Amino acid sequence: MVFFQLQRTVPLSPDDAWRRLTEWSRHGDVVPLTHVAVLTPAPTREGTVFEARSGLGPFTFADRMEVTVWQPPSDEGPGRCRLEKRGRVVLGWAEIEVRPGPGGRTRVLWREELRMRFLPSFLDPLVRTTARSVFGRAVNRLLRGR
């Protein structure tokens, strides 16, 4: 299993950063070869389930996730979302946190622990590097609104 985290400070309000990062269907627009489908009715809440299907042709796998913590940002504290990954291939969790930062900006923290079933642990460094790169670009694009 690998762990990585990403930190960003962006010129957005916490509410705007939260909205951009938790619009699940948009994740498919910013992660290559991925389509995201929300499987439960809106709005997002604890218990929301969605699936990211990644790959090409017969080499496709589903990353099924469930929202287990849903705390949008408020005057009382930062926004926090936890996703449990429950797919046949991808397991683990991801946490997104947004909080006010310096100069009216917002700090974003994305933490993730993931395991690719069927991959031997000696490939963990490659999985970590690849995941940091893919998710780093995705977070940047989501926060830019693209």
Image: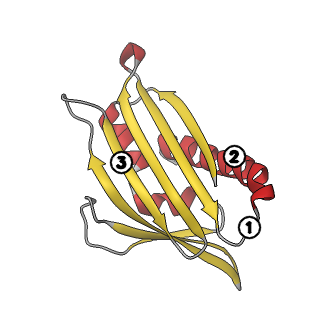
Q: Secondary structure at mark 3?
A: strand
Separation of residues labelled 1 and 3 (CA atoms): 27 Å
Separation of residues labelled 1 and 2 (CA atoms): 19 Å
Query: Residue 81, which numbered label?
Result: 3
Do labels 1 and 3 touch, CB within 8 Å? no
Position of 33 relative to 111 (above/below): below
Q: Earlier in the sequence, mark 1 or mark 2?
A: 1
Closer to us: 117 or 49:
117
Q: Earlier in the sequence, mark 1 or mark 3?
A: 3
Residue drawn at point x = 65 percent, y = 70 percent: 117
- Of labels 1 and 2, the one closer to you: 1
Position of 87 relative to 122 (above/below): below
Query: Residue 108, which numbered label?
Result: none
Label 2 amino acid? Ser
Using a 10 Å C-alpha cutoff, classify the residue at mark 1 as few (fewer than 14 neighbours), some (14 to 19) or many (20 or more). Answer: few
Q: Secondary structure at mark 2?
A: helix
Label 1 amino acid? Leu
Closer to us: 9 or 93:
93
Image location (x, y in percent) of residue 71: 26, 45
Closer to us: 117 or 103:
117
Image location (x, y in percent) of residue 57: 71, 83
Q: Which residue is identified by label 2?
A: 133
Residue drawn at point x = 80 percent, y = 56 percent: 122
Position of 76 relative to 29 (above/below): above
Say how many tags the image has. Answer: 3
Q: Earlier in the sequence, mark 3 or mark 2?
A: 3
Looking at this view, name the residue that lies furthest to the left: 76
Label 3 amino acid? Cys
Query: Residue 119, which numbered label?
Result: 1
- Of labels 1 and 3, the one closer to you: 1
Q: Is residue 36 left or right of residue 56?
A: left
